[in-house]
Amino acid sequence: MFRSVGDRYTYLEVHTTVSDLDVLARDLLEGWAAGRRLLRRRVRSAMGEPALPTAQVELLRLVETEPGIRVGDAARSLRLAPNTISTLVRELKQEGLLETGVGDGDGRAVHLSLTDAACKRLGRWRDERIQTLAAALAALSEADRRALRQAQAGMAALVERLEEEA
């Protein structure tokens, strides 16, 4: 039932007692990953423009929700090293998607903001994701859609718990 990877074994293979929670965790991870991957592929295909790496998209989304965020604060929020954020900022500036500016009180602090091109791209990407997922939801039975609606609260609680532990 469970596969080994090379000479390494998965968590569920090593533990002789597999709880229902272990199986649920594995199934959720596999479902989450597959769903995100498929949605990302469909949206990228529909967008007709080169895809941005996930880390760049995460930084753009953060700057969208927190305009003027400083590089150090972005690193903490995304749980990445400051030099990684600096690299992402440099790449996104070269793509014309991110602008930097010096903060009011501290001449050393770099603040981030989206360009108009980034705002438009994020908007198109968000709209395409919603339309793609809505079309897939429309193809489901009402019972499946009801089950997904009921699962939303549990998923939100799970994400909150993961954030607390991070």
Image (cartoon, rainbow, N blue to C red):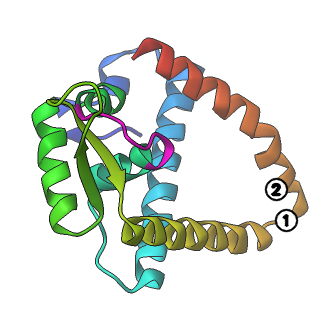
Q: What is the number of the mark on residue 153? A: none
Quadrant including the N terminus: top left
160 left or right of 22? right
Look at the magenta stretch and give its main secondary structure.
Answer: loop
Check disc 2 and report the residue beneath it: 145
**134 or 69: which is nearer to us?**
69
Q: Is residue 20 above or below residue 118?
A: above
How many numbered marks are there? 2
Residue shown at 28% from the left, 78% from the top: 50
**96 or 130: which is nearer to us?**
96
Residue 150, position as x, y percentages in the image: 82, 39
Contact? badges 2 and 1 (CB < 8 Å): yes
Q: Amino acid at mark 1?
A: Ser
107 left or right of 3? left
Residue shown at 11% from the left, 47% from the top: 87
**78 or 12: which is nearer to us?**
78
Q: Give, as a single range, the part of the protein colored magenta.
A: 64-71
Residue shown at 20% from the left, 31% from the top: 109
Residue 79, position as x, y percentages in the image: 29, 28
Check disc 1 and report the residue beneath it: 141
